[in-house]
Image: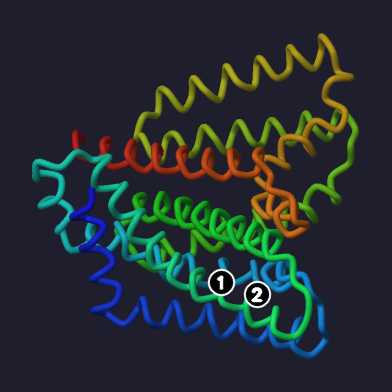
Amino acid sequence: MGTICRKEIRGYFTSMLGYVFIAFMLVISGIYFTAYHMQAGYPIFGYSLSSITFVFLIVTPVLTMRSLAEERRAKTDQLLLTSPLSVWDIVGGKFLGLAGVFLISCLIMGIYPLIMSNYGTVNMAMSYAALLGFFLLGCANLSIGLFLSSLTESQILSAVLTFAVLFLCYMMNGIESLLGETASTSLLAFALIILAAAVLIAYVLKNTFLAVLVGIVGEAVLFVLYLARSSMFEGAIQKVLDVFNLTGHFDDFVNGVFSVSGVVYYLSVIGIFLFLTVQSIQKRRWS
């Protein structure tokens, strides 16, 4: 895993992509840092970090699109898959490489609270808790992008898919507010989610039978539950969609709360998508 990680980091800085990524992160964060803290005088560093979460919609697709999609297109993934390394070592190494590049930009941004302290009182614990949450949020985004990169050999398609998925997660608060809290609304939304899950299973695992089985059984169970107790569906879709609200758990860190639930949430997202990435590669390896 360490070998793959070092190879990935070296590749990002050899191709200048790593330098461009770090420069872009620092330019955007520097603009908001100057506006919020140097000019407006806000003492809470988390405000600027919360305002730049949109950058993940841009940098994540660009940084992750080549991770697996390019190797699949160039057939160099066959060399990795036939090496003594396990698939978990390969995926873990690539993720750590991505996280390492992102960590460099976060470490540099860690200087900002020290600069602020020269002009007034700054709560350092609160500032660095927000920076930790920002790092975990970024790693969660990177794990999603890595998984989507494993689904295709086209870098462009990988980038578009990653942007679309992250955009939906970014807009989750707005989507929740648009949906009614009635039981029938939740029923329809859950039915569409089950259908989408079946389509995803068919695409990723190439198993039509399993996809159809999941779709039919899932929809049947859903309607039985609705007929038995429709009241439990009231407002249920909002609670489910909140699971996909990546930035929602970051708010606690911004407010100076070291959220254990937030840490567990982000680590869970990372673990789930790395697991899905491994399964995607394993399926292609033996198909």
Amino acid residing under circle 2: Pro
Residue located 41% across and 61% down the image: 158
Amino acid residing under circle 1: Gly
Residue 144 at x, y percent in the picture: 48, 51
Q: Quadrant of the C terminus?
A: top left
Residue 257 at x, y percent in the picture: 74, 50
Q: Nearer the viewer, residue 109 or 236?
A: 109
Residue named by callout 2 = 113
Does residue 10 lie above or below 234 as drawn?
Answer: below
Residue located 54% across and 35% down the image: 197
Q: Is residue 113 left or right of residue 21?
A: right
Give how far apart the Cα atoms at labels 1 and 2 are. Answer: 6 Å
Does residue 55 lie above or below 136 as drawn?
Answer: below
The mark found on residue 38 in the picture is none
Residue located 42% across and 35% down the image: 202
Residue 106 at x, y percent in the picture: 51, 69
The 10 Å Cα crowd at callout 2, few under 14, some 14 to 19, many 20 or more, is many
Question: Answer yes or no: do the residues labelled 1 and 2 have beta carbons within 8 Å?
Answer: yes
Residue named by callout 1 = 110
Which image quadrant for residue 274?
top left
Q: Secondary structure at mark 1?
A: loop
Q: Nearer the viewer, residue 41 or 196?
A: 41
Residue 186 at x, y percent in the picture: 80, 32
